[in-house]
Image (tube, rainbow, N blue to C red):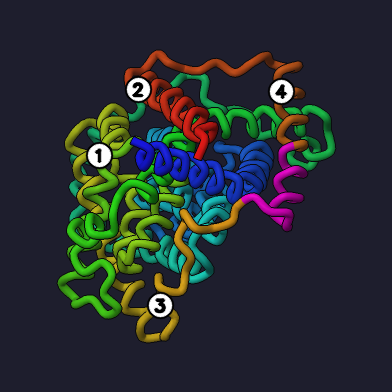
């Protein structure tokens, strides 16, 4: 029993340490994302994404890059763009870019995994879009696309931000503009806090309780310095399968990816796991509600194919360039000294004060944000997040 309690305490401290490492990165990323979402409107993006030409795909990628990394927010924006006439390829390019090329995700990956994974994330994001473009052009069923567009138009809310496009120069100099940024900042945290809480808690539990032999059995070839091609391919397939049944978003998955890296999973398997935020079960259900099940499964199949291919290309491309990261050189997430007086401490204090200021401003202007528990998936996430918080509170206070 004492061993279990000690491991529980270690798991809770590891989770809190992981979040302590990443808090400033989350806050910085969401501040940047909030500013861009306020000063670059959806209507402005929509006007540039009509066809599937190189210009439209390039602009869609750019708009996705400067947009939110929350998968569910990106899904809603993509639906709006597609419903208003944007081509399927630009719409999917925006979706892939907004969940794989955003600034805040790169910052968190750098904190937990290192520069090679940041390069892999951004180069891989571009490869995902290019491969998706090719695959859709080869397989695109025109009738299915039109049916999906009609379904998306029915799902699109009537209060979309159409009409006059605000002058971003005026907004950026006004109190109103920055008040919108404060509201958007709070809403960004509202969208992801449950995913982040669950994701970090799961990462701490797995890092402390799950033996390395489990990862070697699940990810065949994990721990091998030079896994065979078929082993790397299997790991690329296991990554999205493992992610499919989780409710954890892309930001919450990063500490878990760090645990996989510490346990010897190949670079390709980890990248496939990170890229899998758009092939999880909740996303599939939302896509089905937006476009119908046929289109949802079509998009799922496209994304699975391109993420596995991208992960493999990155893995062997990095080998050719001799920049493949070595898990043996890293320090286990359970052995790191998280709470020390260094740059992380001062960054966290600064962004904590900024976050409190923005939250108070938002509450004074619009009141407290609601929990949005009308959907079953949101209710399940809320319950799991509360259980995770209780687990962390009790575990961190256990005497060891």
The tag earlier along the polypeptide, 2 or 1, is: 1
Is 397 placed above or below 47 here?
Answer: above
For numbered disc 2, what is the local secondary structure?
helix
Residues under labels 3 and 2: Cα distance?
Answer: 38 Å
Label 2: how many Cα within 10 Å (few below 14, some 14–19, many 20+): few
Kindly identify which numbered label has been placed on residue 133: none
- In depth, the one of 97 and 374 nearer the eye is 374
| Distance in Å between CA atoms under marks 3 and 1 | 29 Å
Pointer 4 or 2: first along the chain: 4
Q: Name the disc covering residue 324, or none.
A: 3
Q: Residues within 10 Å of mark 4 (few under 14, many from 20)?
A: many
For image coordinates 54% across by 32% down, the residue present is: 397
- Classed neighbour count for the residue bearing mark 3: other residues with Cα under 10 Å, few (<14), some (14–19), many (≥20): some
Q: Which residue is mark 2?
A: 380
Range covered by the magenta-colored residues: 339-352
Residue at image mark 1: 245
The residues bearing labels 4 and 3 have C-alpha atoms spaced at a distance of 44 Å
Q: Position of residue 93 (x, y in %)?
A: 40, 52
389 relative position to 298: left or right? right
Query: Real-space Cα distance between discs 2 and 1?
Result: 14 Å
- Nearest the eye: 234 or 226: 226
The residue labelled by disc 4 is 362
Quarter location, residue 78: top left
Residue 84 visible in the current orientation: no
Q: Secondary structure at mark 1?
A: loop
Determine the image quadrant of residue 163: top right
Query: Decide: marks 3, 1 in contact (CB < 8 A)?
Result: no
Q: Secondary structure at mark 4?
A: helix
Magenta run includes residue 14: no
Mark 3 or mark 2: which comes first in sequence?
3
């Amino acid at each position: 029993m004492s061993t279990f309690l000690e491991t529980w305490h270690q798991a809770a401290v590891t989770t809190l340490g992981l979040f302590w490492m990443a808090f400033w990165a989350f806050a910085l990323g969401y501040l940047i994302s909030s500013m861009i979402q306020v000063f670059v409107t959806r209507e402005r993006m929509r006007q540039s994404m009509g066809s599937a030409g190189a210009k439209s795909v390039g602009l869609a990628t750019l708009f996705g890059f400067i947009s939110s990394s929350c998968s569910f927010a990106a899904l809603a924006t993509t639906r709006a763009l597609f419903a208003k006439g944007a081509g399927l390829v630009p719409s999917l390019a925006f979706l892939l870019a907004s969940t794989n090329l955003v600034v805040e995700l790169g910052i968190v990956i750098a904190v937990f995994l290192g520069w090679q994974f940041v390069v892999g994330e951004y180069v891989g994001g571009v490869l995902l879009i290019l491969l998706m473009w090719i695959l859709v052009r080869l397989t695109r069923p025109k009738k299915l696309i039109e049916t999906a567009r009609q379904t998306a138009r029915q799902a699109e809310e009537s209060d979309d931000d159409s009409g006059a496009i605000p002058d971003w120069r005026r907004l950026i100099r006004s109190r109103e503009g920055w008040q919108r940024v404060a509201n958007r900042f709070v809403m960004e945290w509202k969208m992801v806090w449950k995913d982040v809480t669950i994701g970090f808690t799961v990462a701490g539990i797995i890092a402390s309780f799950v033996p390395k032999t489990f990862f070697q059995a699940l990810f065949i070839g994990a721990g091998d310095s030079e896994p065979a091609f078929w082993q790397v391919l299997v790991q690329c397939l296991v990554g999205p399968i493992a992610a499919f049944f989780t409710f954890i978003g892309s930001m919450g998955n990063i500490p878990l990816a760090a645990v996989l890296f510490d346990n010897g999973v190949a670079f390709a398997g980890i990248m496939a796991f990170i890229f899998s935020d758009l092939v999880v079960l909740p996303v599939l259900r939302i896509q089905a509600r937006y476009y119908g099940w046929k289109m949802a499964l079509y998009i799922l199949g496209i994304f699975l194919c391109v993420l596995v291919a991208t992960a493999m290309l990155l893995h062997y491309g990095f080998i050719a360039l001799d920049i493949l990261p070595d898990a043996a050189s890293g320090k286990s997430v359970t052995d790191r000294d998280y709470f020390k007086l260094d740059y992380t401490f001062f960054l966290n204090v600064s962004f904590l004060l900024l976050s409190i200021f923005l939250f108070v401003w938002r509450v004074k202007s619009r009141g407290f944000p609601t929990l949005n528990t009308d959907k079953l998936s949101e209710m399940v996430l809320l319950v799991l997040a509360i259980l995770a918080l209780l687990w962390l509170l009790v575990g961190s206070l256990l005497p060891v």
